[in-house]
Amino acid sequence: MIDFEEELKKYEPAIEVEQAEADIKARDLTDLTDLLYNMTAQNNTTKQ
Amino acid sequence: MQCFMCGAEVANSKICYNCGADILLYKQIIYTSYVFYNQGLEKAKVKDMTGAIEALKSSLQYYKYNTRARNLLGLCYYQIGETVRAINEWVLSKNLQENDNPDADRYLAEIESDPGLLSKLNSTIKKYNQAIEYCKSGNRDLATIQLKKVISQNPNLLKAHQLLGLIYIEDGKFADARKVLTAAAKIDNNNTTTIRYNHEIKARLKESNKRHKKKNDVISFSDGNDTVIMTETSLRSMLDNTRTSLVNILLGLVVGLLICFFLVVPTVRSNMTDGNTQTVISLNETLAEARSENDALQEEIDKLKTSLSAFDNKQDVSTSYDNLWAAQNYYASGDSKTACEYIQLVTKDVMGEQGQIAYDNLYAELGPAMTEGYYEEGNAFYTEENYESAIINLKNVVDTDEKYNEGAALFLLGDCYRLTGDTDSAMECFNKVIEYFPNNKWGRQAKVYIAADDTELSAAEIGD
């Protein structure tokens, strides 16, 4: 059985147009290639 | 291919010999990103938007420069009504790959080409957010109204459908909830939330049916805007009271009918009898008046007839005198035949005393000639077997002189009657012939007819 109150908590306010820019800026765009790059860089530093 | 670390050319080698970077792992990451993109594309094609979004997000987590995946993710967001998220993805796509990114260019250009779109979009989003607030504060009615407006403005906003469906489920309006969730399923056919809500509806309906079966004694019905719920016992007692009321009403009706029968009906009948008597009297009066009027009219008619006959006689007087005068003139000139024709046109009764004397004198003089003329004509008609005309002429002869031509006229008249089937008149004529002339040929022939009762002999057999 669905608990209405609990279910309602899953509904978050939608992003308004004014908040779009802030939302883009707040996005973490780090991907696996970035991690690989950092790991490789760290390895290279450690070897040196 | 260049190394992602130092930018040196690595060709197909697994490791960069310049910096030692793991090129194979890098390639595997990018390959995985494209695998997820392909999955997302497949799912988007079959309108599984949730699955597509998840796959595309995964694709971008592996490799953020996968522009195709990002553009498609924006498109998926646009499809489920989340236009701001879609715009964000396209803007990011454009920033990460400024050149050679025609899809992002096109999508953003379409958004910019409609200036009112963003304000309308913002208004819809605010209403949706307001609806969430209403829900959280317990105002589900207001939330329902807001969500209906949101759906009318942005029919693809999946979350609005789902939230409205959730409210309907909570309010027990399962049919409405199912309708809204069906619309949501058309936008995103494999959304977990939508499917879960549909299952919830089924479960609640099943439970409601079970409860209804168990609690048969609880009865609910709507009275105007209110829903009345009561136990079966109380309903039965209410119905019993209703029965008592019905019996009372029936008793009242019976008493009313009896009063009507014993009091009202006799009065009505008496009134009707009085009314009939009055009608009969008035009809009699009318009849008497009509009769007296009829008598008066009849008298008037008689008077008019008398006047008319006097007028006709007056008119006939001059004609009769003219005809008498003409007959005298023709007789004097020796044309007895024409004189006979004219004197027959004279009406003796309308003339004066002198006129009648003149008529009698002339008639006496013309009589034999007239009789002879009638006889000749009658005889001629008899020969021609024109018995009707013969009867007219011969009757004129017999009326003047029954013994004319030794009973020949009388015999021929009788024979004409015989031949026309008037046996009684024929026998009367034959008897007179026998009476007057028992021994001549007419008398003998008449005897033959009477004695033998042979009335079928023809004129030719008798001869002249």
Image (cartoon, rainbow, N blue to C red):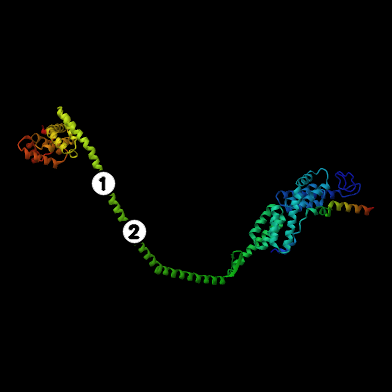
- Furthest-top residue in this view: B333
Q: Nearer the viewer, mark 1 or mark 2?
A: 1
Q: Left or right: where does residue B328 sit relative to residue B31?
A: left
The disc, 1 or 2, on the residue closer to the chain's N-terminal end is 2
Front-lying residue, B323 or B62: B323
Amino acid type for the residue under numbered disc 1: Lys
What residue lies at 84% left-to-right and 49% top-to-bottom?
Answer: B26
User: Residue most toward the left?
Assistant: B439
- Residue A36 vs residue B381, the one in the foreground: B381
Check residue B282 in the rendering and tell me which mark sits there, or answer none.
2
Dots 1 and 2 on the same chain = yes
- What amino acid does circle 2 point to? Ser
Residue B303: numbered disc: 1
Residue B196 visible in the snapshot: no
Tell whether label 2 touches label 1 (CB within 8 Å).
Answer: no
**Image vertical order of residue B151 relative to residue B219, above or below:** above
Would residue B424 be seen by someone viewing this image from the given angle?
A: yes
- Per the model, the C-alpha gap separating discs 1 and 2 is 32 Å
Q: Position of residue B13 (x, y in %)?
A: 86, 45
